[in-house]
Image: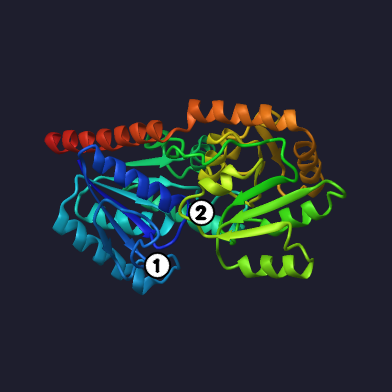
Amino acid sequence: MKIAQVITRMDTIGGAQVHVRDLSNHLAALGNEVFIITGGGRAKHHKLDVPCYISSSLKREINPLKDVRAIFEVRKVLKETKPDIVATHSSKAGLIGRIAAWSLRIPTVFTAHGWAFTEGVSPKKRKFYIAVEKAIGKITNQVITVSHYDRHLAISNQVLPMHKIKTVHNGVLPIKQTEQLNQNKSPVNILMVARFDVPKRQLNLIRACEKLGDIPWHLSFVGDGTKLEEAQRYVGKRNLHDRVLFYGGMNFIEIPLSKSNVFVLLSDYEGLPLSILEAMQVGLPIIATDVGGVKEAVIDSDNGFLIPKGNEVLLRQRLTQLLTDVSLRESMGQRSKELFIEKFTFKKMLTETKEVYEVVIQNQLTKGKTH
């Protein structure tokens, strides 16, 4: 297969970017011809084994003039390269890429890494994005959702018919552990991996830890973003420098994971976060906000705890349980490993995604023969 991957940005580190990088590199290793079309500059944060084309007008923000230019820029690359299929990622690239490919009669697959109309998004924005996805869905061959939650959300909002949507759970590559996790160490180290930006809630976690009384704890954050300085100022103001560590943005998080005992992700909305899957792979118990597809990875009271959005009292209770009970951390961590192996390996995701691409291409060929 000759596959074009289209994404708004590859010059940052995020779930969709990591997904596109790893998927593209491994599809190419299997003998497929793969290239990426992206806005936002060169992919300096990612090691890519495939060519990367830049569309200078492809931006995340809505701008009618630039968006039209982006369609023509992407269309030009597609016309020259002639891929068998165009796979798009993220809302804006999904729109631009699908229109450009449709104009050239190239079949498309859109991977929704969490819908732009998910719960937690403002009603006005939800209404707008539902209308957009309904319209663009008519020229889309197949949509991949990374969770069953997102599949049901699209169907319930009548965005797409059931036969056009398939769930392929996210998967992450094997992580090399630099040392054996020691669940008996004190203080217990809590880790959160996420951009300091909407919809994440790093400050809520810091404040919850502050209220744990005499329970010893240490908190580490991986990620950068627009709200990082706000969190750093808060830590300075509260004199928490010795208890809170900011790693910043990182390509590989083996070291933070290996030094952690508990993983936490607080967020207003999600698709199916790769960071949770990475933590499960190395055997960490999880505390996460019960939004989006999170419950498909974190089973409450099994491999971790789910917290209703905004419930700070329950968050502190669950943190207290895991910080004070070594055997609970160990048993939940073991369950995380088992669930990861069963459902979220990269090999499983790669195989299922490749099958979707192949079916779409075959259906297009069959359709062409019957016309």
Amino acid at pointer 1: Lys
Who's the residue at 29% across and 64% down the image? 71
Report the front residue among 77 and 219: 219
Mark 1 residue element: loop
Q: Which residue in the structure is indicated by mark 1?
A: 59
Looking at this view, name the residue that lies furthest to the right.
213
- The answer to whether residue 289 is seen in the rendering is no
Q: How far apart are marks 2 and 1 (CA)?
A: 16 Å
5 left or right of 244? left
**In the rendered image, which quarter contains the N terminus?**
top left
Q: Position of residue 112 (x, y in %)?
A: 44, 47
Mark 2 residue element: loop
Who's the residue at 73% across and 28% down the image? 327
Who's the residue at 29% across and 56% down the image? 99
Amino acid at pointer 2: Ala
Q: Where is residue 366 in the image (x, y as percent from the top left)?
A: 17, 33
Residue 11 quadrant: bottom left
Using a 10 Å C-alpha cutoff, classify the residue at mark 2 as few (fewer than 14 neighbours), some (14 to 19) or many (20 or more).
many
118 left or right of 347? right
Q: Which colour scheme is used?
A: rainbow
Who's the residue at 44% across and 37% down the image? 174
18 left or right of 3? right
Residue 201 quadrant: bottom right
Q: Where is residue 73 in the image (x, y as percent from the top left)?
A: 25, 66
If you read the primary sequence from the N terminus, does the residue marked by circle 2 or circle 1 appear first? 1
Q: Which residue in the structure is indicated by mark 2?
A: 116
